[in-house]
Image (cartoon, rainbow, N blue to C red):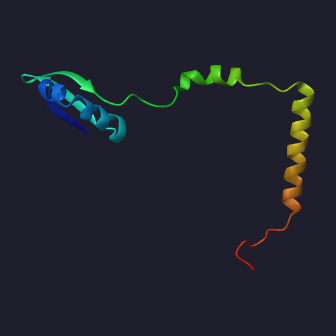
Amino acid sequence: MSHTITVTEMARRFADYLNRVAYRGEHFVLVRGSKPIAELRPLPSGRRLSDLPAMLASLPHLAPGDAERFGDDVDMARGELATTPVRDPWQS
């Protein structure tokens, strides 16, 4: 939800409004006279989906033999889990 405030009010209490944006995520539309001229809002956090290929490329890569052995280890662990009886965690 956006709040509308005057530029004069923003100038008088600038630090307070910045804190409200930073800690509460509030949005403010600044008006001069009756005309909206600017918006104060939090910047989006996180990363863009378009950054994903570069992030994945920057990860370390396994050598082909290591990747194969890792896959074998995962298959073995899945097999062991499938044969392990389910234990009731609430049973004493």
Asked whether 2 or 19 is in front, the reply is 19
Q: Residue shown at 55%/22% (left/top)?
A: 50
**In the rendered view of the protein, which quadrant contains the N terminus?**
top left
Residue sitting farthest toward the bottom: 92
Residue 83, placed above or below residue 71: below
> Residue 3 falls in which quadrant of the image?
top left
Is 54 on the left-hand or right-hand side of 2?
right
Residue 17: quadrant of the picture: top left
Give how far across and how far down residue 77 sits, in percent. Answer: 87, 50
Q: Quadrant of residue 12?
A: top left
Which residue is found at the position 20% from the left and 28% from the top? 29
* Point 84% across, 51% down: residue: 78
Does residue 54 appear left or right of residue 17 in this picture?
right
Quadrant that contains the C terminus: bottom right
- Looking at the image, which residue is at 27% across and 34% down? 27
**Residue farthest left in this picture:** 33
Q: Position of residue 43 (x, y in %)?
A: 39, 28
Number of marks: 0
In this rendered view, identify the residue nearer to me: 74 or 9.
9
- Give how far across and how far down residue 69 sits, in percent: 92, 36
Q: Nearer the viewer, residue 21 or 46?
A: 21
The percent position of residue 6, horizontal first and vertical second, equals 13, 28
